Amino acid sequence: MESLRKMLVVLMTMVVTVRMVNASLVYVGGGKETWRPNVNFSEWSARQNIHAGDWLYFGFDKKLYNVLEVNKTGYEGCHDVGFIKNITRGGRDVFQVNEARTYYFINGGGSCFGGMKVAINVENPQPAPSPSQLTGVKSIKNGSPSGFGGLVLPTGTCFKICMFWHHLTLPRSSSTRENEKRLAKMEVFSLKNMHLWLITVVNILWSTAECREPVLHRVGGGKYTWAPNMNFTAWAMHEEFYAGDWLYFGFDKTRYSVLEANRINYNNCNDKNCIANITRGGRDVFNLTEARPYYFLSGRGYCFKGMKVVVHAQYPPPDPAPLAVRNVFPSRVLVTASPCFLLCSPPML
């Protein structure tokens, strides 16, 4: 009975939030090539929820535009002298926002005066939601691929759990005597009913969980790990790639390159007749648009030094089906305290 009591205490703090732990990739302006004039970046930025650890994606024509990080004064005055950092590489550039603060970006050469500037407010990662936040509404980043999703149970779902539990446990009569008898029976509340309640809760949570969203994978595991003497085979074996995900290649563009090749050229380290040259500025991204193997290598002989990788992209997992009878929770979820269960928590035995 003591172990059952402990289990009930755990159940009282059960999930109303299911979180993935990957950072988001946010398209600045809302599209793949929207770092350009005549885009309302202020309106776009006001609709975003960007957190420390997320990535910004700037897509633009590098022959015409650039991306400069500046301070607030430089942003307001469109001063492109004395900038903090020049993010411009190849026109498909990414920038990681590492801390919670306001970041300012402009385009140099006068286009800033035409509206090519944006202020992005970055917040700390969100904690578990408060009761007022339990609305069941998902935050969407204007279609930007994201790997950091969250589930907030709708009020109706919470009440389904509550009602099921009350159906099993609450007295069915207002008679004090009958209530006492029922409470006495609860002293020997069967573990079978306990498991039935647990399974129902898990099914409700899992059936309303969010679908997986695209993820940004750093090839090699770091910011600048597209380099020789890296075990890319081992890295790829520890990753799960799905259609829609993105690859990030960080490297020295004066020495290395990124070429998409077919299987034969990959095996032979042949850098001729490649499918696509991904090389732009040394911080380049590639979208896995379909479920198939992708083969990448570096030219100039570095492929023979291990600079090649095969990425097996799968179809995204389907919507989760109801779980079979199990005594454990599904993996890759984070259990956080739920005020909902304070309203319908099972009585202590």
Image (cartoon, rainbow, N blue to C red):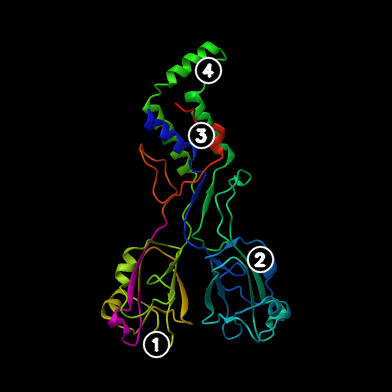
Q: Please, what secondary structure does the residue beneath circle 1 have?
A: loop
**What element does badge 3 sit on?**
helix
Tell me whether circle 2 and circle 3 mark residues in contact (CB < 8 Å): no
**Is 292 displayed left or right of 140 in the figure?**
left
Q: Which label number is shown at residue 44?
A: 2
Residue drawn 57% across and 52% down?
Answer: 138
Question: Where does label 3 land, which residue?
Answer: 161
Residue nearest the viewer, comparing 221 with 215: 221
Q: From which residue to which does the magenta span run?
A: 296-316
Q: Is residue 198 left or right of residue 345?
A: left
Q: Position of residue 93 (x, y in %)?
A: 52, 76
Q: Give coordinates of residue 249: x percent, y percent.
A: 43, 75
Quadrant where the C terminus lies?
top left
Q: Amino acid at mark 2?
A: Trp
Tell me whether the residue at label 3 lies in contact with that at label 1, contact meaning CB atoms closer than 8 angstroms: no
Query: Which of the two discs, 1 and 4, labels the residue nearer the N terminus?
Result: 4
Three-letter amino acid code of the residue under disc 4: Arg
Give the Cα separation between the discs numbered 2 and 4.
54 Å
Report how far apart the C-alphas of labels 2 and 3 lie in the structure: 38 Å
50 shown above or below 232: above
Tell me which residue sits at (42%, 21%) in the image: 187
Q: Earlier in the sequence, mark 2 or mark 1?
A: 2
Check whether the beta carbons of the residues at disc 1 and disc 4 lie within 8 A of each other: no
Look at the numbered disc 4 and give the secondary structure of its residue.
Answer: loop
Q: Nearer the viewer, mark 2 or mark 1?
A: 1
Q: Which residue is mark 1?
A: 255
Q: How far apart in space, not on screen, are marks 3 and 4 (Cα)?
A: 18 Å
* Badge 4 density bin: few <14, some 14–19, many ≥20, Cα 10 Å: few
Residue at the spot of label 4:
172
Front position in the image: 94 or 15: 15
Foreground disc of the pair 1, 4:
4
